[in-house]
Amino acid sequence: MLKDIVSYITYGLMHLERGSQLGDAIEFFIYDTIKIILLLAIIIFVVSFIRSFFSPEKTKKILSNKKEFIGNILAALFGIFTPFCSCSAVPLFIGFIEAGVPLGVTFSFLISSPMINEVAVVLLWGFFGWKIAAIYMVTGLLVAIVGGFIIGKLKLEKWVEEYVYKFNFGPKKELIKQTLKERLLYAKLNTVDILKRVWLFIIIAIAIGGFIHGYVPQDLLVNYAGKGSPFAVPIAVALGVPLYSNAAGILPIVYALMEKGLSIGTVLAFMMAVTALSLPEMIILRKVLKIQLLAVFIGIMTVTIIAVGYLFNAFL
């Protein structure tokens, strides 16, 4: 029904030529903007309600002193429901270390938080369908679990800046229990707040995606990073690292690129690199990590993301 309505708006009311570059671009923009905003409103509300049960303090308490691997799994799962932007990486990292959360477990959380959250899952679902969204979420969890587990096994605490271990946040405040009404109100307010913060990025990104969809020649992209290129995934990861965006900003562009002939593994590896391995976030993390640990983290993430990209290309 939505497609019919958008088609009528594009070609009936706006009198654009069906099959034209401008018509295709406008139809892409209107349809995906409406679809994604509706999906976001619903899913963010549900996830916000779940998130009301897990404050950062409670999360740190649950993850403290957990055994290896089990702690990595729990941390990666918590990352889905408690996403933090990269600007929160430094205080979050310090808080987890101060609370006794193992280094590898902390990294599992930090990897999964930007890579897998409700915005990423909704957009993936909206653009690629629930199967791709589920596969990406499971794969992202594995990346976070394995990456954090490897860092934990390497025992690299000596490469954390010394001042991090000297922080003391004082006595932890007692968590106040919320009523159902308060949790629903929190979910409503959080949904409105997130939509206010991401709607413009979504519209701009979908507009760019619409331009790519309607105007960028398919051969231009396929020749350099198409399905036949063995170096498509590493090239995509290398291009993603200098960028800084969230799922709302990058996924509409990713979808348009895939429609132009790029493989699903290539574009999702690009997305992972942008959300979890961006240069600005590495600069922020350098404040708490010595260069050796930062290099190990970047190396592990790069290899893992490239492997995931090839895996997606091989089986999807």
Image (cartoon, rainbow, N blue to C red):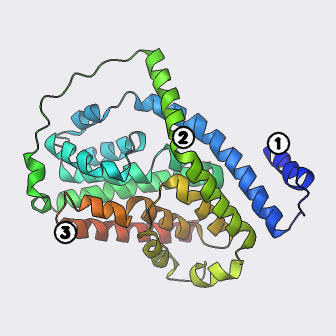
- The residue lying at 36 percent from left, 41 percent from top is 78
Residue designated by label 1: 1
Q: Is residue 84 above or below residue 172?
A: below
Number of marks in the rendered image:
3
- The residue lying at 45 percent from left, 77 percent from top is 234
Residue closer to the observer: 87 or 175: 87
- The residue lying at 54 percent from left, 40 percent from top is 196
Name the mark on residue 196. 2
Q: Position of residue 140 (x, y in %)?
A: 43, 55
Q: CA distance from mark 3 to mark 2?
A: 36 Å
Characterize the local packing of mark 1: few (<14), some (14-19) or many (20 or more) Cα atoms within 10 angstroms.
few
Q: Is residue 130 above or below residue 209?
A: above
- Dot in front, 1 or 3: 3
**Secondary structure beneath disc 2?**
helix
Looking at the rendered image, the quarter that the C terminus falls into is bottom right
**Secondary structure beneath disc 1?**
loop
Q: Earlier in the sequence, mark 3 or mark 2?
A: 2
Q: Is residue 39 left or right of residue 192?
A: right
**Secondary structure beneath disc 3?**
helix
Looking at the rendered image, the quarter that the N terminus falls into is top right
- Dot in front, 2 or 1: 2
What type is the residue that disc 3 sits on?
Ile
What type is the residue that disc 2 sits on?
Lys
- The residue lying at 22 percent from left, 53 percent from top is 104
Residue closer to the observer: 239 or 235: 239
Name the mark on residue 43. none
The answer to whether residue 124 shows anywhere in this view is no
What type is the residue that disc 1 sits on?
Met
Q: Earlier in the sequence, mark 2 or mark 1?
A: 1
Residue designated by label 3: 291
